[in-house]
Amino acid sequence: MDIVKDIFVFLIGLCWGSFLNVCIYRLPKGISIICPASSCPNCGAKISLFDNIPLLSYILLKGRCRSCGMRISLVYPTVETLTGLIFFLIWRKFGLSIDAFLYALFCSLLIVISFIDIQYKIIPDLLSLGGAGGGLLASLGLSGITFWDSLLGLFLGGGILFIVAYGYYKLRKIEGMGGGDIKLLGMIGSWLGYKSIVQVLLIGSVAGILVGLPMILIKKDRYFQIPFGPFLSGAAIFVLFLDLVHLKISLF
């Protein structure tokens, strides 16, 4: 009954995605992710358990608060659905294992970082630096990399982007990349190992250009800021699932 297990894992992902929404909303504001209970940001009405069912409540409420009718952001069902799908893919790839549990945490970090970066243009150190430390610890339990792969990935990932950012600043005298992106790539390296850095940076950069250039043209602003975090995060998840780290295309 694989389909029952698949559905169960997807539902767990939906529920976990609901918690990630709490993190995305509260962490940048400095609010505890444990309390108080969830409430409407417009009218302050407490959200009942029935109205807090992942994805289903959004559909039944037609995307609006039951109390004041304010439209609920699409971010909520998007994060829940995305987390459910990623949990499903992790389950399919790694089965019931330590790798599955650890990579679920890693992908959760990337989801929270991405949506915070999109909305606030920041990547909290709590997530990037804390995630990097978590990656070093996780390497002790992951089957795909060693602690030294993780440590080298941390310094190589952060180092490459630091050199790029520093060089850009020296040439243009303006900041072209935030420190959060530098720490994020270091964090990704700590989870996926040093061999992942080139692929993640290449895929993330190409995706960023394909999305960013049209947006700059539409906005008619060459200095329009586009967060790089979601592209690095998406590239990391892409590399994780497609085993690009193990293909013989690495420069290392």
Image (cartoon, rainbow, N blue to C red):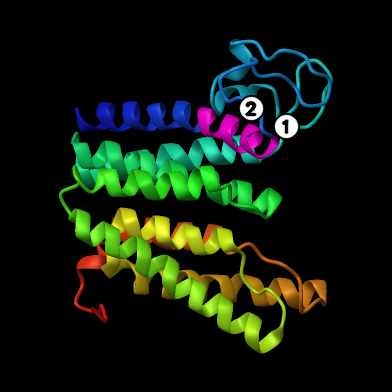
Q: Which residues are magenta?
A: 18-29
Q: CA distance from mark 1 to mark 2?
A: 8 Å
The amino acid pointed to by label 2 is Tyr
Residue at x 71%, y 30% (from the top left corner): 63
| Residue 45, above or below 28 | above
Q: Is residue 250 above or below residue 48?
A: below
Quarter of the image containing the C terminus? bottom left
Sequence-wise, the earlier of marks 1 and 2 is 2
User: Which of the two residues, 171 or 49, is positioned nearer the viewer here?
Assistant: 171
Residue 206 is left or right of residue 72, and the answer is: left
Magenta residues, dominant SS class? helix
Q: Is residue 76 above or below residue 205?
A: above
Q: Quadrant of residue 209?
A: bottom right
Is there a contact, CB below 8 Å, between mark 1 and mark 2? yes
- Dot 2 corresponds to which residue? 58
Asked if the stretch drawn in magenta spans residue 27, the answer is: yes
Q: Is residue 167 left or right of residue 183?
A: right
The image shows residue 60 at horizontal and vertical percentages of 64, 22
Which residue sits furthest left? 143
Question: Disc 1 designates what residue?
Answer: 72
Residue 112, image x, y percentages: 53, 43
